[in-house]
Amino acid sequence: MATKPNIVIILADDMGFSDIGCYGGEIDTPNLDRLAANGLRYSQFYNTARCSPSRASLLTGLHPHQTGIGVLTYDTGPEGYVGNLSEACATIPEVLKGAGYRSYMSGKWHVAKSLSEPSSAWPMQRGFDGFYGTLTGCGSFYHPNTLVRGNDSADAEARDNPDYFYTDAINEEAAAFVRSHADAHADAPFFLYVAHTAPHFPLHAPEEDIAKYKGRFDEGWDKLREKRQERLIEAGIIRPEWRLSDRDPSQPPFDEADNRDWELRRMEVYAAMLDRMDRGIGRILDALDETGQADNTLIMFLSDNGGCAEVISPGTDLKQVVEELQIAQYTTRDGRPTRFGNIPSLMPGDEETYQTYGIAWANLSDTPFRLYKHWTHEGGISTPLIVHWPEGIADKGGIRHRPGQLPDIMATLVEITGAPWPETRKGEAVPPCEGVSMMQSFEQDGERPGTMFWEHEGNAATRDGRWKLVRDYPGPWELYDMETDRTELTDLAADNPDRVAAMADAYEAWATRCGVIPREKIINTKMRKLDPIAEHANQEGSNT
C-alpha cells in the first residue's frame, strides 16, 4: 500500500447474530449488505457478552478484566471491577497515534465511571481528537442522557431540537468527521469509531420507520427462527447439521402468546431501529466516496453482544435509573411523564415509552443459537462481523469460518498500520495485546492459533479448536464440539472428563492471569450495586 488505510469500526448495541439481511434476517440493511457483498463475512467471531466489557476489550486489545471493566461501569469491587477504564491500558487511538493517525468517535462510550465531569477515562483523554456522544449505557433516542461534545455537555442540542434522533446524530457526526478530516488533515490517515446505541432499549423509532415493518413479523418467532436458519445455511454461514435450538422454554409458541399486537409492535420497532441505523451508515459511506477515501478505508461492522433478553418491570425505581444510572429521563421534551416498563397496553416507539423487545424476540435475534447477552453460550457472544476494504480484500463476498474474538481487532490494526505497541502508559506497564491478527484471513480462510477465553458474571467459556467448554453460572461445565454441534445441544462433558479437566485448568490459569474474580466474591462484596433491569431478565410473564 502506498499509504496507510483509514479505519472505521462500526459497533451495533445488543444486536443478535442473525438480525441483518446479509446474516439471514428480515430487516432491511442494504448498506451493510453492500459492504458484505464487496467484503468478507465472518461466521465465528465473538464479542464479550455485554456492553461495557466488549467496548473495553475492543478498544484495548485486552480482556475486559485487565482494563478495569470486569462487569459494567459501576463499581462492583476491587481492581479489575472498578468500572473505569484503567490507566494501564492503551486504546486504539493511543496506539495508532504512533503510526500517524488522527482519531474520532461518534456514539456510546460506556467505559467511564464519571458521567458528568471529564475524567482520565473519557474519550478525549484516551486519544480521540474529536468526540460526540454519550457516556452512559443507554437512554432515550429523542433526548439521550450524558450527551457530550468533546468534554462539554451537549444536552441542549437534543433537548431543544424537536427533530433530534440519536441514531441520526451519531451517523451525521461521523460523516462530518470524515469530511472535516479530508479538509484539514488529508495527509494523515484516520481512525473513526462509530458506536451506536441501536438497537439497545428503549424501543424508540419514528412512526414512519415502524410502519414500514407492519406485517413483516406476523408469522411469529417460531416460524421466523426456522426461516432464518434456512437462509443462514443457504448463505454458507452455518452448517446444515447444526440443529436449530429450541424456543426458550420460558416462552409460549407464538400462536399461544398473549398481547400479540403488542408483541409484534415490539419487534417492528426493533427492526425500525436497525433500519434507520443502516440508512445512517449509508451517509458515512457517502462521505467516504465524496472525499475520495472509500477504496483505502478498512471498515469493520459488528455487535457488542447477543440479543438482549432483559425485561423492564413497570415497578423499577425510576429515580435510580434517571439519577444514578442516568439511562432515562423523567419526562419527554414536551413535558409528558416517561412510562417506564414493558406495559402491554402501551405500544412502544414514542418518546414517552421505555420498553425492551423481550425474551422470545431475542431468541429470534440469536438464531440458531441459545441464550443471550450476559451468557457465554453462542447466543450471548456470537456476532456478525463484516470486513470491507476495497484495496486490501480481493475475495469480494467471501465467508470466513476462522474463529476470532475482540482483542484480535487490535492485533489486526497493529499489523496493518505498523503502529508500535506501547510498553508503558503514564508510567504504568501496558500488558501485551491478547489478540491474534486476522490479516492472513483477508486472503484465505484458516484456523486461529491459540485458545480463546470469556467470563462475565460467572458465566465462562474457553474454546480450543473445535472444543468449547462453557458454563451457565452457577451450573457445571458443559462441553460441545463446535464442528458438529455449534448450537450447543449435546453436552459431551460426561463422556470426556479428561478434556473437561484440562480445559477447566486452562481457564483457571487464564482467569488468574487476567484478574477474573470468582463471581460469589463479587456478589458478596459490600461495594456491589444492583442492575435494576438485568435482574428482571428471566421471567417476563410475571413482570408485564
Image: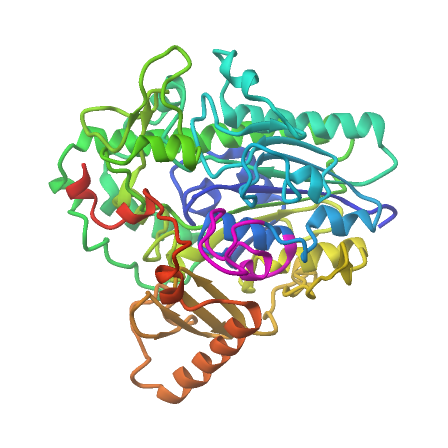
Quarter residue 347 falls in: top left
Q: Which segment did they paint magenta?
A: 60-84
On screen, residue 499 above or below 291: below
User: Is 49 rendered above or below residue 295?
Assistant: below
Residue 110: say if magenta: no
Picture coordinates of residue 364, whole percent (x, y): 31, 46
Query: Residue 70 in magenta?
Result: yes
Give me the residue at 16% from left, 42% from top. Answer: 541
- Helix, strand or loop for the magenta stretch, by majority: loop
Depth check, front residue: 280 or 475: 475
Residue 26's x, y, as percent? Answer: 38, 38
Give me the residue at 28% from left, 41% from top: 311
In the image, farthest residue toward the front:
526
Q: Is residue 94 visible?
A: yes
Q: Is residue 398 visible?
A: no
Residue 184 image-quadrant placement? top right
Residue situated in front as seen by the camera: 323 or 305: 323
Residue 41 rendering spot, x and y as whole percentages: 55, 52
What residue is at 73 percent from the left and 43 percent from the top? 127
Work out which quarter of the rendered image holds the C terminus and state it: top left
Q: Residue at x 60, y 52 (%)?
A: 58
